[in-house]
C-alpha cells in the first residue's frame, strides 16, 4: 500500500492539509468578489480542487482517523456557513442546494466503508465525485439544450452524456493504474470492461436523479459500492449477474410501459435490484421480486376495477398516474431492505437475511392491507377511535385489510423460507410474519395520528396529497414532513429494527 507522509507526524500533516483547504477557499472567495466570477464557476472550481486534495488522503495518512475528522469538521462548517450565507464561492447557486454538505458526508462514508476494506473503491468514488460530476455540470450549462428533471434537479442530455463518458474514463483509469498500487489482483479484460461500463452507468443514474445536490452523496457511494461488490463477484456468478441485469431491465421496462412505475421509479428499482443481487445473489433478489410483482398485480387489479380512483383523499394529480410509483415511493419501501442487503454484502452475516425479510414483510403487509382492504364492502374505521372513515384514508382499517396484511407478511416470509431453507424454521417464519404484520399496524397508527393532511384551497377537501402543499394548501393536521412515503419508510425501518432484536 503506498504511503508518503508529508510531515513528521500525522497531526502536522493534518494541520497542513486543513490549511491548504482553507487557503483555497479564501482565494476563491476573494476571486469571486474581486472579478465577479459567477458562483457556479467558483463552486465547481472548489469542488474539483478539494476533491483532488481528498483523493490523496489515502496516500498521506496511515489510518483513517484524521481524514474522518476532516470530513466531519466540514460537514459542520458547511452546514453553518450555508445557513449564514457565508463562503458564497462554495454555496451560492441558482437553486437551493446542500451539495456542499453532501460532499464531505460522502467522503466520511467512503472512508468509513473502504479505507481498509477496499482503497481502490474509495479512490474511484472520490475521483468520480471530484471530476465527473462537475464535468457534467459544466457541459450541461455550456451546451445543454434539452433540459429534463427525473426528480428535482434539472439536467440536460449533454450533461448526462458527459457524466457517463467522464465516469467511464475515470473508472477505467482508476482500475488500470490504481489497482496495482493497492495490490488488487489483475482484472481480466472482460471484467474490466464490464466493471467500467456498468459502474459508469450506475454513477450516471445516481447523478441524473438528484435533489438539492444529493448527487454529491449518491454518485460516489454508488460508484464505490459497485466497484467493490462487482470485483468480489465469483467468476461463476458473472453470467447469472448479467442475466439478472438484463432481465430486471426488461421487467422494469414493462412496469413502466404498464404504468406501474415512472421513469425515475424504474431506474431506481433497477439500481436497487442490481446492488441487492451483487450483495447476495438470487436468494436475496427473489423476495424483492415477489413483493414488487405481487403488489403491482394487486394495485393494477384495483385500478382496473375502478376501486382506487373513488377513494376520498386522492387528488386529481394522484388520479392522473394511478399506481405509478416514483423514485421516492420505491425507496420508501425498498430503501431499508437495500441497506440490509448492502450490510450483508460488506460483512457476510447470514442472519441479516432474516432481517431483510422482516423489512420486506412489513412493506408487503402494509401494501396488501391497503389493496385488499379496498375490497371491503364496509367502510374502514379509524384504528384508534374506531370512527368510520372514507375509503383510502390513512389510519383506517378493515377486517379484510387486516387479514390481507397478515397474508402478505406470511407470503413474503414463505418466499424467503423457500429460497433459504437452511436458515429457517416454523418459528422463524412465524416471527417474521408477526413482525411484518405489526409493522403495518405502526403504519396505520402513524397515519391516524401524525401523518400530514392538507386542506385543498380549491375544494376545501382534507387530503394527504403533499403536492398540494406547493399550491397553497394549508396544513390541517399532523407533521408536515411525515407524508405517506415517510410513513412507509418508518414501517420498513421498524420491521428491520424488530428483526435485529428478535432474529439476530
Image (spheres, rainbow, N blue to C red):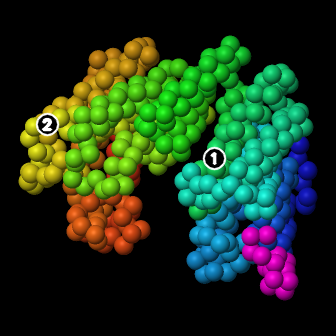
* Pointer 1 local density, CA inside 10 Å: few below 14, some 14–19, many at least 20: many
- Badge 2 element: loop
Q: Is residue 409 left or right of residue 119?
A: left
Quadrant in the picture for the N terminus: top right
> Which segment did they paint magenta?
26-41
**Quick check: marks 1 and 2 in contact, CB under 8 Å?**
no
Q: Position of residue 82 (x, y in %)?
A: 62, 75
Instruction: Name the residue: 33% across, 49% down.
Output: 319
- Badge 1 element: helix
* Badge number at residue 453: none
Q: Position of residue 370 (x, y in %)?
A: 25, 40
Tell me: residue 400, above or below residue 204. above
Magenta highlight: main SS: helix
Foreground of the two, 254 or 64: 254
Instruction: Name the residue: 68% across, 60% down.
Output: 104
Instruction: Name the residue: 61% across, 65% down.
Output: 98
Of the residues tagged 1 and 2, which is closer to the observer? 2
Q: Is residue 199 left or right of residue 249?
A: right
Q: Position of residue 3 (x, y in %)?
A: 88, 47
Q: Position of residue 480 (x, y in %)?
A: 35, 65
Judge whether residue 259 can be spotted in this image.
Answer: yes
Q: Tag 2 or tag 1, which sits nearer the N-term? A: 1
Residue identifier under label 2? 376
* Pointer 2 local density, CA inside 10 Å: few below 14, some 14–19, many at least 20: some
Rounded to the nearest angstrom, the CA distance separating label 1 from label 2 is: 41 Å
Residue lying farthest to the bottom in this orientation: 34
Judge whether residue 47 can be spotted in this image.
Answer: no
Q: Is residue 290 left or right of residue 411?
A: right
Instruction: Name the residue: 84% across, 53% down.
Output: 56
Magenta highlight on residue 21: no
Residue identifier under label 1? 206
Amino acid at each position: 500500500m503506498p504511503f508518503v507522509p508529508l510531515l513528521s507526524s500525522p497531526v502536522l500533516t493534518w494541520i497542513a492539509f486543513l490549511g491548504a483547504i482553507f487557503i483555497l477557499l479564501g482565494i476563491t472567495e476573494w476571486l469571486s468578489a474581486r472579478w465577479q466570477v459567477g458562483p457556479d464557476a467558483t463552486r465547481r472550481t472548489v469542488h474539483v480542487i478539494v476533491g483532488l486534495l481528498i483523493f490523496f488522503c489515502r496516500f498521506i495518512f496511515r489510518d483513517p482517523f484524521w481524514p474522518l475528522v476532516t470530513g466531519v469538521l466540514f460537514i459542520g462548517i458547511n452546514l453553518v456557513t450555508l445557513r449564514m450565507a457565508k463562503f458564497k464561492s462554495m454555496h451560492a447557486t441558482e437553486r437551493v442546494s446542500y451539495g456542499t454538505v453532501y460532499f464531505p458526508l460522502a467522503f466520511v462514508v467512503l472512508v468509513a466503508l473502504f479505507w481498509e476494506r477496499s482503497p481502490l473503491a474509495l479512490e474511484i468514488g472520490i475521483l468520480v465525485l471530484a471530476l465527473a460530476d462537475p464535468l457534467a455540470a459544466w457541459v450541461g450549462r455550456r451546451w445543454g439544450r434539452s433540459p429534463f428533471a427525473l426528480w428535482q434537479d434539472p439536467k440536460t442530455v449533454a450533461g448526462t452524456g458527459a457524466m457517463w463518458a467522464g465516469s467511464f474514463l475515470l473508472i477505467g483509469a482508476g482500475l488500470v493504474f490504481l489497482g496495482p498500487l493497492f495490490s488488487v489482483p489483475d482484472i481480466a479484460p472482460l471484467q474490466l470492461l464490464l466493471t467500467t461500463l456498468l459502474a459508469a452507468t450506475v454513477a450516471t443514474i445516481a447523478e441524473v436523479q438528484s435533489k438539492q445536490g444529493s448527487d454529491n452523496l449518491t454518485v460516489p457511494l454508488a460508484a464505490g459500492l459497485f466497484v467493490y461488490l462487482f470485483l468480489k463477484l465469483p467468476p461463476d456468478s458473472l453470467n447469472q449477474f448479467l442475466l439478472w441485469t438484463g432481465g430486471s431491465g426488461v421487467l422494469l421496462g414493462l412496469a413502466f410501459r404498464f404504468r406501474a412505475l415512472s421513469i425515475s421509479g424504474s431506474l431506481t428499482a433497477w439500481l436497487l435490484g442490481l446492488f441487492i443481487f451483487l450483495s447476495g445473489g438470487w436468494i436475496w433478489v427473489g423476495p424483492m421480486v415477489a413483493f414488487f410483482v405481487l403488489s403491482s398485480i394487486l394495485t393494477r387489479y384495483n385500478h382496473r376495477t375502478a376501486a382506487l380512483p373513488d377513494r376520498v383523499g386522492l387528488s386529481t394529480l394522484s388520479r392522473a398516474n394511478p399506481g405509478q410509483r416514483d423514485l421516492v415511493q420505491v425507496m420508501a419501501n425498498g430503501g431499508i431492505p437495500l441497506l440490509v442487503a448492502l450490510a450483508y454484502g460488506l460483512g457476510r452475516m447470514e442472519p441479516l437475511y432474516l432481517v431483510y425479510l422482516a423489512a420486506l414483510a412489513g412493506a408487503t403487509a402494509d401494501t396488501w392491507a391497503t389493496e385488499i382492504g379496498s375490497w371491503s364492502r364496509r367502510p374502514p374505521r379509524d384504528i384508534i377511535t374506531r370512527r368510520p372513515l372514507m375509503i383510502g384514508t390513512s389510519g383506517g382499517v378493515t377486517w379484510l385489510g387486516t387479514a390481507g396484511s397478515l397474508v402478505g407478511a406470511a407470503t413474503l416470509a414463505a418466499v424467503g423460507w423457500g429460497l433459504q431453507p437452511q436458515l429457517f424454521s416454523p418459528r422463524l417464519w412465524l416471527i417474521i410474519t408477526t413482525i411484518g404484520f405489526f409493522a403495518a399496524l405502526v403504519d396505520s397508527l402513524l397515519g391516524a395520528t401524525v401523518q400530514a393532511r392538507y386542506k385543498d384551497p380549491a375544494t376545501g377537501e382534507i387530503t394527504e396529497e403533499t403536492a398540494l402543499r406547493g399550491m397553497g394548501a394549508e396544513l390541517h393536521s399532523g407533521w408536515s414532513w411525515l407524508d405517506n412515503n415517510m410513513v412507509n419508510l418508518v414501517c420498513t425501518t421498524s420491521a428491520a429494527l424488530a428483526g435485529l432484536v428478535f432474529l439476530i
